[in-house]
Image (spheres, helix red, strand yellow):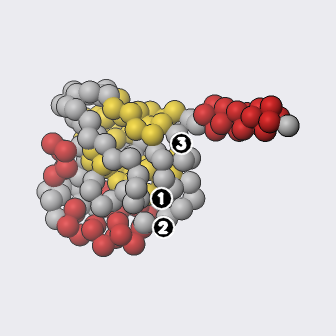
Amino acid sequence: MKLQTFAALALSVFTVFTSAANHEVKMLNSGADGYMVFEPAVLKAAVGDTVTFKATDMAHNSASIIGMIPEGANSWNGGMSQDVSVIVNKAGVYVYQCTPHSMMAMVGVIQVGESLTNMDVIQSKLASVKAGFMMNSERLDTYLESL
């Protein structure tokens, strides 16, 4: 009986780890949405998936924005011109930026699962984040509206 229970548990853990997907987001000087963009800018993922931000063009990073990811979620702050990977461990919406190009609204959004539970918190912080944008001020609104 114990062996059957252990086998079932091992199979369920194996299934979780083998079903997690790997997503790639490029950090670009120019892309489909204009200058200084992440591509894709809006990504849908599942809990446990890995998102790798690729330093396709130099002088970019990817960093989660404080207060704009689900409570208890893994935050990140990648190095300049370096790939960074993050496991999205909580359902909800994650908003991130390229720190040196945040004034150009170099931002992106990841929706993990079907949940939008933290959207009210994101909306409450949206004006302060957008206040730092010198251009492309509608970009983040557009991304969030597409969820």
Q: Are marks 1 and 3 in contact (CB under 8 Å)?
A: no
Q: In this orientation, does residue 119 appear?
A: yes
Q: Are marks 2 and 1 in contact (CB under 8 Å)?
A: yes
Residue type highlighted by circle 2:
Thr
Mark 1 or mark 3, whichever is nearer to me = 3
In which image quadrant can residue 137 be found? bottom left
Residue density around tag 3, few if under 14, some if 14–19, many if 20 or more, within 10 Å: many
Residue nearest the viewer, comparing 89 with 80: 89
Q: Decide if residue 6 is on the left or right side of residue 34.
A: right
Residue nearest the viewer, comparing 24 with 31: 24
Indicate the secondary structure of the residue bearing disc 1. Answer: strand
In which image quadrant can residue 63 be found? top left
Point out the image quarter for the N terminus: top right
Q: Earlier in the sequence, mark 1 or mark 3?
A: 3
Q: Are marks 3 and 2 in contact (CB under 8 Å)?
A: no
* Above or below: residue 134 compared with residue 26: below
The residue where tag 1 is placed is: 92
Q: Measure the C-alpha gap from mark 2 to mark 1.
A: 6 Å
Residue at 72%, 38% in the rendered image: 9
Residue type highlighted by circle 3:
Gly
Q: Measure the C-alpha gap from mark 1 to mark 3.
A: 12 Å
The residue where tag 3 is placed is: 48
Q: Earlier in the sequence, mark 3 or mark 2?
A: 3
Q: Position of residue 47 (x, y in %)?
A: 54, 47
The residue where tag 2 is placed is: 117
Residue type highlighted by circle 1:
Gly
Residue nearest the viewer, comparing 136 with 52: 52
Residue at 30%, 73% in the rendered image: 124
Residue density around tag 1, few if under 14, some if 14–19, many if 20 or more, within 10 Å: many
